[in-house]
Amino acid sequence: MIFNSLEFFLFLFVVFMLYWLALKKSIKGQNILLLISSYVFYGWWDWRFLFLILLSTIVDYFIGIAIHKNEKQNVRKAWLWGSVLFNLGLLGFFKYYNFFVDSWIDMFSLLGYNIKSTWTLNIILPVGISFYTFQTMSYSFDIYYKKLKPTKNFLAFAAFVSFFPQLVAGPIERASNLLHQITNRRTFNYNQCVSGLKLILWGLFKKMVIADSLGPIVDDIFANYADYSASTLLLGAVFFSFQIYGDFSGYSDIAIGTAKLFAIELKSNFKFPYFSRNIAEFWVRWHTSLSDWFRYYVYIPLGGSRKSKLISIRNIAIVFLISGLWHGANWTYLFWGAFHAIAFVPIFLLGKNSKYKNSTIGEHSLLPSINEVLRMVMVFSLVTFSWVFFRSATIGDAFSYISRMFTEFTFYSYMHPRGFRMIDYYILIMLFVIYEYLIRRDERAPFKFKSKYIRLIAYAVVVLCMLLFYDSKIDRSFIYFQF
């Protein structure tokens, strides 16, 4: 079941009505409903993998209690390692087993040994496993660092792990933010629900109009890059930048908006990352829940930036390489992570990694300064270049794509694979960037205009675009489901 489907909205309507009408006065009943609904939502894809979520829930529930009960540091650490090894074991088997086997065989092939691959398995990657394993691990980490006391309410903890709006593609929530909202009584708030519906609408626009409409173009260019000139390859990279942003941030908006319907607030996950003025600011604005996870549970425990510059650079490299590997079992993701580490280190050494942490582009004026525009273009160019690694099927394809992008300077007008007018897509992206700039101060209020007439026009344009760009023949699944 995906957010941009009719069955999801029928499912959401039924759950919403039961939650607020039949179970309004029973927090236990609401949590039971959330848990059942979340398992139905996930099981709609493949019910066989529900046992993995349940198993991860049971393991970290009891490990959290065990860590809290023990005062001896070595015992607490042993229990924590139990959580880490269990969850990473699940993730490693289902996501990385074949990758490591194939890489091992390739390494021997380079040494002149021809080994037949008899150890690879036909493994189905469970949707969302990278997200919910990290979420349950964060619970054990927070108890270990004494930032959180374990809950004895297994029902609430199970609902926290499997909360369906953010189960399969985030935001990755820490228990300190989400769990207490599930254990405490919730009351219906009309304004909160309206805010949620607005976010759902904006998220659907970004997914259906931006991401889905650009998908066929990106797929065609990356699949046939050897046939295209530099201008078309550049177009493919730029369009993928907007496709993945519209797809992933659209999902996050829908998730946050859906949670609001149940009086639950999830953390923001995207804060207009393409308006960043250096690569460090980009990572403060892009997939922030994952960035925070790595900062709290990898970077800081390794020493963060408290030690020497060399150790800090090592820690930065580790975080970005793990982040790349988290996204997928392919060398392309490791190169993508390495590229961002290399781009981040100079900013860190210059002491500018926090320079733009609490500000936005054009903060005190209607338009950005020339300096801000140039910095924004530079960051967008670097990020777009890195997306070539992320999107390519193999590392060889990525380097070939980049090589042609800088050598094949013949310019041809690109023709849409299905014959649609390309000018419409250029105008769409331009207007989307302008609109995002207008709402750049608050990622949770996409229709925050003083005039109700402007709001109505915005609603009408968004809905009209969704109808005009809807295409039943394209793949409507979310990109990050594969991670």
Image (cartoon, helix red, strand yellow):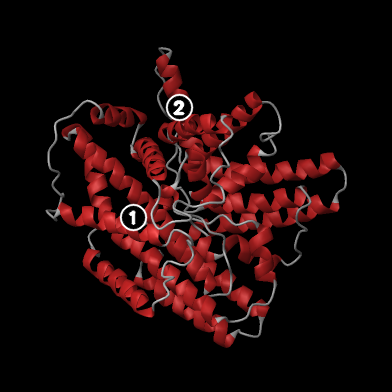
- Residue type at mark 1: give it: Val
How many residues crowd mark 1 within 10 Å: few (<14), some (14–19), many (20+)? some
Q: Residue at x 69, y 70 (%)?
A: 183
Which quarter of the image is occupied by the N terminus? bottom left
Location of residue 33 in the rendering, given as x and y in whole percent from the top left corner: 58, 75
What kind of residue is marked 2?
Answer: Ser
The answer to whether one can see residue 418 in this image is yes
Tell me if 187 is positioned left or right of 275 in this view.
right
- Rendered view: 224 above or below 154: above
Residue furthest right as drawn: 71
Residue in view at x 49 percent, y 29 percent: 342
Mark 1 or 2, nearer chain start? 2
Q: Position of residue 257 (x, y in %)?
A: 48, 69
Q: CA distance from mark 1 to mark 2?
A: 41 Å
Q: Is residue 247 left or right of residue 28?
A: left
Is disc 1 in contact with disc 2, using a CB cutoff of under 8 Å?
A: no
- Residue at x 59% of width, y 34% of height: 351
Local SS, label 2: helix
**Which label was assigned to residue 103?**
2
Disc ID at residue 433: 1
Query: Which percent across, then down, holds residue 126?
Result: 48, 51
Q: Is residue 226 above or below residue 266?
A: above
